[in-house]
Image (spheres, grey):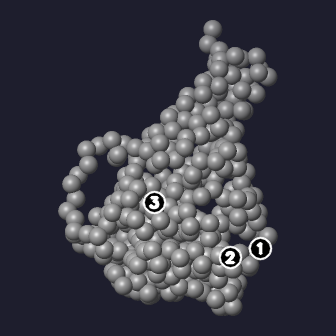
Amino acid sequence: MNPFASLSITELIPPVAALALFVAELFFYRITYMRLYRRAMQPSKQEKTNGQPPVSVIVYADNESCNLKENLPMLLTQNYPAYEVIVVNDGSTDESDEVLTALTREYPHLYHTFIPQESKYLSRRKLSLTIGIKAARNEILLFTEARCRPLSNQWIASMVRHYTEPVNLVLGFCAYRSQKGFFHKLVAYDNLLDGVRYLSAALINRPYSGNGKNLSYRKSLFFEHKGYSRFLHLHAGHDDLFVNESATAESTRVDYTPDSLTAMAPYARFADWKEMKTAHAATQRHFKGHRTTFYRMETLCSIAFLLAVLASVAWGLSTGNPLVVSVGIFLYAALSIVKAVVWRKTALLLCQYPFTPWLPFLEIASWVTGFYIYLCRLFRRKRDYTFSFGGK
């Protein structure tokens, strides 16, 4: 006897919906999230290079003397013939200035400037970076932060090798350094998800975002778009919104080879990470294009799939139909395996420690955190990371 024969159309909805959403999720993971790994496995095309043009590396720092002491030597000993490192010290009150002064004596290509704490500005970070860009002597700019360090002494060479006409922007990836604890696994998962999304979109000529922890563009591009003038009222947006506004399919390249990667220090507190996530969420409503909507659909699809699986299992148990229960469990297990394989391969590709056993819990925690951040923004209303002097 057909175990589905006794079920009504209403009772068939949960397993059929779970199956449909399973197929949709397979599409997202096989086509979109696996794209970086597939491209990396293909024979690389030999790109024409423009030699090794002089580069200005701009580093943003805010009370990070320990990070500067630890990470700057990796920046200052790159295997590259002509470059300068400009550290913009944003009103630091710790020992950052003493660390930079000492390093300047050892490395003559290190320069640093200071933004007074009293400076009033809609976004101190944008002010700091603008001053760093204006101080840069070279056309090719490469951005990172004091809490980040390159994983290779070929970082500069790897990121700037793409600069031929008409390229004026290169997107890179910054991995999250391994740390024990569920919070750090959640941050690593979120960082990997965000990076794969914007890199994957750029690989199919639809760039929409970037990360200032590993980003490069021409100085002329910055002034051509009048710097950050169109979004000075936002705390964030110095990287993602600038890329969203200025990147085109013809002018944008991606590099996620091992030599091109940077790694960031772990967040000390959940509040710091939450503040960063909330500020960046506030900028996304200003994005042009539909890539963020596309990825929101994937998130909704994942949530709907889990609900459909739970409904199938519950319905099967209540009606005494083990096949319905089995269908729900099988679909969930199959998709979980696909996700685990994709994220493990991608994490290893991007030199980030894999979090495979924790993936189901991290996915749910990511949804809960996203809803929490939405509520934070909702209660801020007009103060949603806009029009606030002295903010970052």
- Tell me the mark number nearer the camera, choosing from 1 and 3: 3
Q: Does the rendering let one see residue 338?
A: yes
Q: Position of residue 282 (x, y in %)?
A: 64, 70
Q: Secondary structure at mark 3?
A: strand
Q: Where is residue 381, by image quadrant? A: bottom right
Residue drawn at the location 34% of the way across and 46% of the way down = 39
Image disc number at residue 150: 3
Q: Residue at the location (70% across, 45% down)? A: 181
> Which residue bears the numbered disc 1?
380
Residue behind mark 2: 94
Measure the alpha-carbon separation of dots 1 and 3. Answer: 36 Å
Q: How many marks?
A: 3
133 in relation to 69, above or below: below
Q: Give the mark nearer the N terminus: 1 vs 3.
A: 3
Frontmost residue, 100 versus 120: 100
Depth check, front residue: 92 or 252: 92
